[in-house]
Image: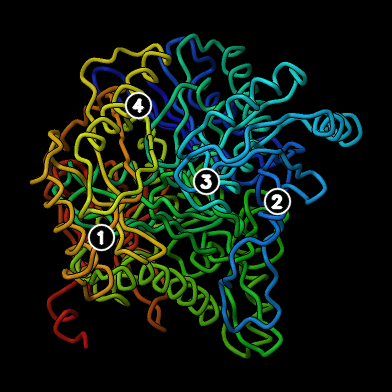
């Protein structure tokens, strides 16, 4: 069997798939102090050993947390003479222009650990000052190693994206004199122009390499001690996987691997369910991740930030909001009810878990309203304590002078509003109307809130795939091996050297195949995808345009430029076809299938008998039908209010919504015609 294990902020998910299509799953509470133990716990809940596992695919937020908590390796930065302050100066921009107390993000490398190297290339890549590694540089670096415990070095020399020879020579010098140091070169990590972003990305890679390598080593040891004999692969931020050894070297490529797995799983299940355009709603215990998918293609972003620091690495365009099942509700100083971003997480978790939590959360509110039933939560493995949830929310109700049920519904509404605003960021602000998309909900709590979020956005269809509670783990197994490469290629479109462009793409193609061979993978049956970054001349940012033709020629280049104008108009509402454009970067993604997943069709059958129970919704008590999802046959339909319970997740069908079970087992939830007509 192939196994996927994804570590979230509250739960760790496991899913196992056999060649015959058999699917098994397990779920365990995450262990923030040592995430590898949570992965092991999930494995042991599934089976006592992993001897039958042929491969394990893993995704986690370990790298992200290391940056946020500043728990990476002590790292030095080597820069061109005169550029020591590049990480301190940053960009003259503020995330909130009206924040009078704005503080720039703290660099991962303090100024005293940034050292200057005598060398210089000009903007064309020509050598102005030859590289000189003198005794002064060696003495300064040795002092950092011996006094401050520096264990990793980032090298970011001026214009090295055009010619990496000085960085490579400096790497050889470092390995000869400081063999214990791990060295990261900007010409390898991020060979693009923009000195600050390139330096920040390279520093983050160097900062994370020892941490990621240590964690990956711990995962290897624990799994092998429990019988694993197969290979281990790691999810990248771009949605592809790489062998664990490559992940140790390319730490920055896994910094956002956790949310990426959910998007891949959503694309896989959306395709099987006949839904091609949708917005994901991945709601877990700590946060909610949303991503726009059009024609089963999730948008990639190359300009990302982690804790305010730029990361130039391919990443799904995912927006994260601090709205999860464990989001804490509180009354602020002005007397208003707030929900999140603080979370009860896995330890202690919501009050109703009975693990020591004392602050009310979204999960407590949902349980108090009767939508979550104590004996069915977590497949019955975790009995909810409604008395503890009622006590916690009761304290808020006294402050707000409302009933406990009114406060509980208010908590859910605020959480829904937070998610709605985040979806607007990745749809309306990107030039897309959310009403043109379905909402695909998963995670432990996504389908509990999806219909209400859809109502706010006037979305008519909600899709809840099979295995919704562990879909991120399924996404790990639905991923391909990928190699993402980029090369700076500045050129004006009016004076484009077609032969040089074709040669540059050929070099990227060969580099990708060499990388696959280094992974020990066959280079046959590799799918190559190309793109060019284009901008209007004089602009400071660009858009990535897919390259459809394998043959590079004048007609293909004209097509790229036409596509750029169209994409620009879609994104910003206007374009300038008469303006000159520039090519900035060339991109290439090489893919190779890692394995197939076969999903059995849901059989038809008689409608199951529903249990009835009272819930609070819309300001009143109502009778709702409760169904056990494994018992629902294909073609089954019902009207809300209804709740569909599963081992690891629950789906809520409000009044004015109806449910139909797809052949794949996916739940298709649809707004009633009267609700659609009543919408403004």
Quadrant position of the C terminus in the picture:
bottom left
Q: Distance between the residues labelled 4 and 1?
A: 34 Å
| Label whose residue precedes the other's in the sequence (4 or 3) | 3
Residue sitting at 28 percent across and 41 percent down? Answer: 630
Q: Can residue 12 be seen here?
A: no
The residue identified by callout 3 is: 122
Q: Distance between the residues labelled 3 and 1?
A: 23 Å
| Circles 4 and 3: CB atoms closer than 8 Å | no
| Circles 4 and 2: CB atoms closer than 8 Å | no
Q: Which of marks 2 and 3 is in front?
A: 3
Circle 1 packing at 10 Å, graded few (<14), some (14-19), many (20+), is many
Task: Name the residue nearer the viewer: 72 or 628.
Answer: 72
The residue identified by callout 4 is: 481
Circle 4 packing at 10 Å, graded few (<14), some (14-19), many (20+), is many
Which label is found at residue 113?
Answer: none
Quadrant position of the N terminus in the picture:
top left
Q: Nearer the viewer, mark 4 or mark 3?
A: 3
The residue identified by callout 2 is: 82
The residue identified by callout 1 is: 581
Q: Can residue 201 be seen here?
A: yes
State the SS at label 1: strand
Q: Would residue 2 appear left or right of 157 to someone viewing this image?
A: left
Q: Distance between the residues labelled 4 and 3?
A: 37 Å
State the SS at label 3: loop
């Amino acid at each position: 069997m192939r196994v996927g294990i994804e570590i979230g902020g509250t739960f760790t998910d496991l899913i196992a798939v056999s060649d015959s299509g058999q699917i098994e799953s397990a779920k365990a509470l995450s262990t923030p102090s040592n995430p590898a133990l949570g992965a092991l716990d999930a494995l042991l809940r599934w089976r006592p050993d992993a001897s039958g596992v042929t491969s394990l695919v893993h995704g986690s937020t370990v790298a992200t947390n290391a940056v946020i908590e500043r728990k990476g390796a002590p790292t030095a930065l080597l820069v061109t003479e005169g550029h020591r302050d590049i990480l301190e100066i940053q960009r003259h921009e503020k995330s909130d222009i009206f924040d009078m107390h704005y503080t720039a993000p703290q660099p991962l490398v303090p100024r005293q650990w940034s050292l200057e190297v005598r060398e210089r290339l000009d903007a064309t890549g020509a050598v102005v000052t030859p590289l000189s590694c003198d005794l002064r540089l060696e003495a300064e670096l040795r002092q950092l190693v011996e006094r401050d415990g520096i264990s990793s070095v980032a090298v970011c020399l001026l214009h090295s994206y055009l010619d990496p020879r000085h960085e490579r020579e400096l790497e050889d010098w470092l390995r000869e004199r400081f063999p214990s140091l791990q060295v990261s070169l900007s010409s390898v990590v991020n060979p693009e122009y923009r000195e600050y972003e390139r330096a920040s990305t390279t520093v983050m890679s160097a900062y994370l390499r020892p941490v990621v390598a240590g964690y990956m080593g711990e995962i290897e040891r624990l799994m092998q001690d429990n019988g694993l004999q197969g290979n281990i692969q790691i999810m990248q931020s771009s949605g592809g996987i790489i062998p664990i050894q490559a992940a140790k070297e390319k730490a920055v490529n896994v910094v956002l691997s956790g949310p990426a797995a959910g998007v891949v799983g959503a694309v896989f299940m959306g395709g099987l369910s006949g839904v091609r355009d949708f917005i994901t709603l991945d709601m877990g215990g700590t946060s909610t991740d949303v991503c726009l998918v059009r024609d089963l293609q999730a948008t990639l972003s190359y300009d990302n930030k982690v804790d305010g620091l730029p990361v130039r690495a391919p990443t799904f365009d995912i927006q994260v909001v601090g709205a999860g099942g464990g989001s804490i509700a509180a009354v602020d100083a002005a007397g208003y009810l707030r929900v999140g971003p603080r979370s009860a997480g896995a330890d202690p978790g919501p009050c109703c878990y009975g693990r020591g939590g004392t602050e009310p959360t979204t999960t407590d509110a949902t349980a108090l309203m009767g939508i979550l039933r104590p004996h069915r939560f977590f497949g019955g493995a975790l009995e909810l304590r409604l008395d503890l949830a009622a006590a916690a929310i009761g304290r808020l109700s006294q402050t707000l002078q409302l009933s406990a049920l009114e406060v509980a519904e208010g908590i859910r509404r605020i959480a829904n509003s937070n998610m709605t605003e985040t979806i607007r960021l990745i749809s309306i602000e990107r030039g897309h109307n959310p009403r043109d998309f379905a909402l695909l909900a998963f995670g432990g709590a996504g389908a509990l809130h999806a219909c209400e979020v859809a109502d706010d956005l006037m979305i008519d269809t909600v899709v809840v795939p099979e295995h919704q509670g562990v879909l991120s783990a399924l996404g790990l197994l639905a991923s391909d091996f990928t190699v993402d490469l980029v090369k700076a290629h500045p050129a004006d479109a009016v004076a484009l050297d077609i032969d040089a462009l074709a040669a540059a793409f050929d070099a990227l193609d060969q580099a990708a195949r060499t990388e696959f061979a280094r992974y020990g993978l066959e280079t046959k049956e590799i799918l190559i995808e190309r793109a060019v970054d284009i901008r209007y001349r004089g602009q400071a940012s660009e858009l990535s345009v897919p390259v459809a033709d394998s043959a590079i020629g004048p007609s293909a280049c004209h097509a790229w430029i036409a596509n750029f104008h169209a994409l620009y108009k879609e994104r910003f509402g206007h374009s300038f076809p008469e303006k000159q454009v520039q090519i900035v970067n060339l991109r290439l993604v090489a893919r190779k299938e890692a394995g197939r997943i076969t999903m059995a069709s849901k059989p038809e059958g008689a409608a199951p008998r529903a249990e009835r129970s009272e819930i609070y919704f819309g300001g009143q008590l109502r009778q709702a039908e409760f169904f056990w999802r494994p018992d629902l046959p294909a073609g089954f339909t019902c009207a809300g209010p209804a709740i569909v319970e599963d081992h690891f997740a629950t789906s809520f069908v409000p009044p004015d919504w109806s449910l139909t079970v797809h052949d794949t087992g996916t739940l298709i939830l649809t707004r009633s015609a009267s609700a659609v007509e009543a919408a403004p």
